[in-house]
Image (spheres, rainbow, N blue to C red):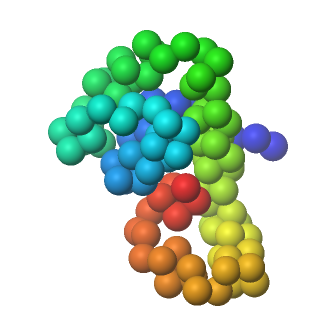
Amino acid sequence: MAKHFDLKKQLRLHDKGLLRRLFAEQRLLADFPWDKLSSRRIEPLVQRWDRIDEGTRRVIPVVLQDVNELADERGQRILAEEIAWRLPEKLAAFAQWNGLADKAL
């Protein structure tokens, strides 16, 4: 069964550096002041997000919904197995992240 997904809650869970990379991969919010963002105060990010047209921004929620599904112990085991099999050189980088949500992202 799918977990409940709340975009604002999901954004609060992640390291701002990872979020910056995610948005950069989609060529979004390049001029956003990421250094001023905190997990407790994400309103500036949400406000900018709301100004992006629907078609352009649809990829990010899909990615974050998948991340939400993988951000538990079972999901982490699956990710670790896949990384060990496909990209063993990336396993140490995967292990460095503290939170389940950041590891899933």
In this picture, residue 32 sits left or right of residue 35: right
Give how far across and how far down residue 37 sits, in percent.
Answer: 24, 39
Is any atom of residue 10 visible in this view? no
Q: Is residue 81 above or below residue 34?
A: below
Identify the residue shown where x is 60% and y is 15%: 54
Give how far across and how far down residue 89 sits, in percent.
Answer: 58, 86
Closer to the camera in the image, 53 or 42 = 53
Identify the residue shown where x is 61% and y is 47%: 68
Identify the residue shown where x is 44% and y is 50%: 21
In this picture, residue 99 sits left or right of residue 17: right
Identify the residue shown where x is 44% and y is 62%: 99
Closer to the camera in the image, 6 or 17 = 17
Image quarter hosting the N terminus: top right
> In the figure, residue 104 lies in which quadrant?
bottom right
Image quarter hosting the C terminus: bottom right
Q: Is residue 93 above or below residue 44?
A: below
Is any atom of residue 91 visible in this view? yes
> In the figure, residue 58 lies in which quadrant?
top right
Give how far across and how far down residue 7 sits, in percent.
Answer: 52, 31
> In the figure, residue 62 lies in which quadrant?
top right
Q: Is residue 103 above or below residue 35?
A: below
In this picture, residue 20 sits left or right of residue 10: left
